[in-house]
């Protein structure tokens, strides 16, 4: 049971027991403070919101280390990114601090400092989200009563990279600028919108040329110099259909460049494609040969796919499914400006609907109304 006792030195000692049965004690100079503390402890226990004061004494670095070790369900590339954010931006600010002593003001000041350093808004957001995940987990684990990541505004996220939308003719020119070994890969990416990792991870067993479909279930990435296969960016599988010309092209490619490891696309020297090597040795040199914009990225082929589909009349929901966006909002945020303005067509349709209903709004003449009123008067 909880109790308050006056000690020989005149201070007041509060003894209480945590929900998991551990004895705790706290000392105060005044009896009123001791009583107030005990009442808050008992109230928190009753509401299920008790936080052991000793738990908050753990340093942020100690807790973050254990938190990172439990992140077993993330891709290797994501793990490397998280470790980098901790090492470069989070631990220098909070590593030595008691996790229970970090306040919302501390979080706001730190976030403002990241922006003041000139970090990109996307980097600031990703770093803050990692910090927020750690503090939220600490709250769930009962180390702190509430995460300090509340009421914090993130800087507006703008892209400094110019997006290039290639026309079908430019896609063909870019493909022709590559060796035959990689031409099918260029067309595949521009007409399916696969992410680079999804393209290079594609296995023969996932391709059905008769149905003209590919199942996208994995992504290939290079982490610390070694290749790793993991789930797609969103973690979801999807099936992407192929136009007839692309199915025929992929079939010919597989016949020309068989893979003992089962990959559809392989490196020129054999084995899986390392994206960095491909970009440096093949993609970047092909861009000026094709007289395409400087700074063209491989990811622009995915953007070009979206633009081509919109030009063909595909809807946002269809494009979301094909490109594997997690939500339709992502699709509209990135490509909404490419959709044509349908207002005039829609208004014409509403006008036609009204006229087909043959609704009459003609004002009756005074002469027609007069006999009715006279008849009623009689």
Image: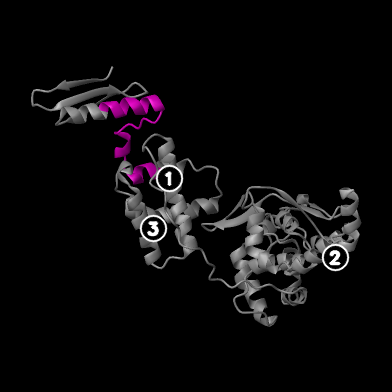
Q: Number of callouts in the render?
A: 3
Q: Earlier in the sequence, mark 1 or mark 3?
A: 3
Q: Is mark 1 on a helix, strand or loop?
A: helix
Name the residue carrying label 3.
111
Q: In this view, does 193 lie to the left or right of 119?
A: right
Quarter occupied by residue 34: top left
Q: Distance between the residues labelled 3 and 2?
A: 51 Å
Taking the magenta stretch, the answer to whether it contains residue 60 is yes
In x, y percent, where is residue 204?
Answer: 77, 53
Q: Residue at x 49, y 63 (%)?
A: 156
Among the two numbered marks 3 and 2 on one chain, the one whose residue lies closer to the N terminus: 3
Q: Give the range drawn in magenta.
A: 38-65
From the viewer's perspective, tell me whether residue 149 is left or right of residue 263: left
Which residue does the numbered mark 1 point to in the structure image?
A: 134
Count neighbours of disc 1 (C-alpha within 10 A) and say few if under 14, some if 14 to 19, many if 20 or more: some
Which residue was labeled with disc 2? Answer: 245
Point out the frontmost of discs 3 and 2: 3
Toward the top, the furthest residue is 1
Say above or below: 120 vs 81. below
- For residue 51, what is the image quadrant? top left
Residue 84 visible somewhere in the drawing = no
Classify 89 as above or below 26. Answer: below
Q: Which residue is drawn at 50% across and 43% down?
A: 71
Q: What kind of secondary structure does the magenta stretch mostly adopt? A: helix
The mark closer to the camera, 1 or 3, is: 3
* Viewer-side residue, 43 vs 331: 43
Q: Distance between the residues labelled 2 and 1?
A: 49 Å
Residue in the picture at 43% in, 45% down = 134
Q: Position of residue 114 (x, y in %)?
A: 39, 61
Q: In this view, does 355 lie above or below 94?
A: below
Question: In the image, what residue occupies the spot 56% across and 71% down?
Answer: 161
For this orientation, the residue located farthest to the left is 9
């Amino acid at each position: 049971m909880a109790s308050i006792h006056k000690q020989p030195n005149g201070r007041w000692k509060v003894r209480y027991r945590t929900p998991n049965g551990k004895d705790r004690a706290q000392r105060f100079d005044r009896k009123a403070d001791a009583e107030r503390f005990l009442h808050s402890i008992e109230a928190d226990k009753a509401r299920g919101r008790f936080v052991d004061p000793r738990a908050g004494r753990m340093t942020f670095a100690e807790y973050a280390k254990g938190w990172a070790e439990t992140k077993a369900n993330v891709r290797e590339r994501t793990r490397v990114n998280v470790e980098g954010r901790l090492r470069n931006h989070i631990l220098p600010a909070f590593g030595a601090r008691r996790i229970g002593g970090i306040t919302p003001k501390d979080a706001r000041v730190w976030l403002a400092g990241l922006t003041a350093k000139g970090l990109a808004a996307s980097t600031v957001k990703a770093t803050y989200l990692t910090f927020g995940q750690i503090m939220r987990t600490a709250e769930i684990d009962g180390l702190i009563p509430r995460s300090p990541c509340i009421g914090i505004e993130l800087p507006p996220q703008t892209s400094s990279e110019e997006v290039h939308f290639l026309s079908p003719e430019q896609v063909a020119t870019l493909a022709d600028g590559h060796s035959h070994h990689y031409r099918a890969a260029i067309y595949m990416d521009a007409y399916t919108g696969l992410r680079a990792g999804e393209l290079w991870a594609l296995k023969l067993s996932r391709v059905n040329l008769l149905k003209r479909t590919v199942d996208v279930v994995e992504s290939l990435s290079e982490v610390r110099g070694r290749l790793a296969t993991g789930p797609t960016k969103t973690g979801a599988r999807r099936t992407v259909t192929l136009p007839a010309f692309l199915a025929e092209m992929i079939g010919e490619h597989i016949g020309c460049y068989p893979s003992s490891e089962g990959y559809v696309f392989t490196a020129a020297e054999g084995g899986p494609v390392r994206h960095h090597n491909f970009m440096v040795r093949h993609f970047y040199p092909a861009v000026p040969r094709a007289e395409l914009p400087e700074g063209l990225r491989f990811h622009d082929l995915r953007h070009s796919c979206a633009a081509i589909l919109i030009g063909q009349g595909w809807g946002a929901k269809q494009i979301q499914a094909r490109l594997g966006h997690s939500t339709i909002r992502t699709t509209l945020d990135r490509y909404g400006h490419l959709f044509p303005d349908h207002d005039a067509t829609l208004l014409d349709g509403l006008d036609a609907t009204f006229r087909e209903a043959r609704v009459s709004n003609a004002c009756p003449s005074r002469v027609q109304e007069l006999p009715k009123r006279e008849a009623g008067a009689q």
